[in-house]
Amino acid sequence: MVECIPYQLAEKVSAQLSIPVIEIGSDPKIDGQVIIFHDLDTFGVDCVPKFANVNRKVMLGLIDYVQEVRAGTFPELDKHTFELDPRE
C-alpha cells in the first residue's frame, strides 16, 4: 500500500511489483484504491445533529466513490494526487 506519493513514483512501483498495489490518493491507474471513512464523510469536521440519519449520505458517498474508482476518474491527478519534483 502506498499513500500520498507522487503519481510518477506510484506508477513505477506498480510496474516493478507482481503483486497488486493499493493506494490512497496517489494515482488512478494503480491496481486498487482505498479511502478512510473520515475522509469520505468528513466525519468530525462538522457537528452531526443527534438524530441525523447519516446512513443515506454515507451510502451515496460510497456509491459515488466506487463508481469513480471503477471509471478511473478518482483520484484526479490535479486534485487528489502528489507530483514528483522534477529535480528529484
Image (cartoon, helix red, strand yellow):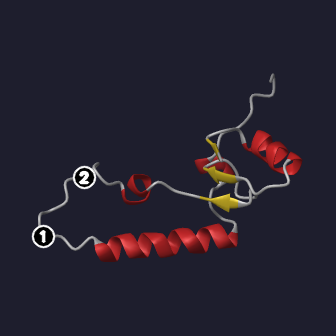
Q: From the viewer's perspective, is 69 left or right of 13?
A: left
Residue 76 percent across, percent down from the top left: 64, 55
Query: Residue 75 sits in which quadrant?
Result: bottom right
Most distant residue in the front direction: 19
In the displayed structure, does residue 50 sit left or right of residue 71? left
Q: Name the residue rendered at 64%, 45% in the picture.
A: 81
Identify the image quadrant of residue 48. bottom left
Residue behind mark 1: 51
Please provide percent x and percent y for residue 1.
65, 47
Left or right placement of residue 15 versus residue 82 in this view: right
For label 1, count other residues whose C-alpha is less than 10 Å away and answer few (under 14), some (14-19) or many (20+): few
Mark 2: few/some/many CA within 10 Å (<14, 14-19, 20+)? few
- Mark 1 to mark 2 CA distance (whole Å): 14 Å
Element type where label 2 sits in the image: loop
Quadrant position of the C terminus in the picture: top right
Question: Is there a contact, CB below 8 Å, between mark 1 and mark 2?
Answer: no
Helix, strand or loop at label 1? It is: loop
Residue indicated by mark 2: 46
Position of 1 relative to 68 (above/below): above
Sooner in the amino-acid sequence: mark 1 or mark 2: 2
How many numbered discs?
2
Q: Is residue 76 left or right of residue 47?
A: right
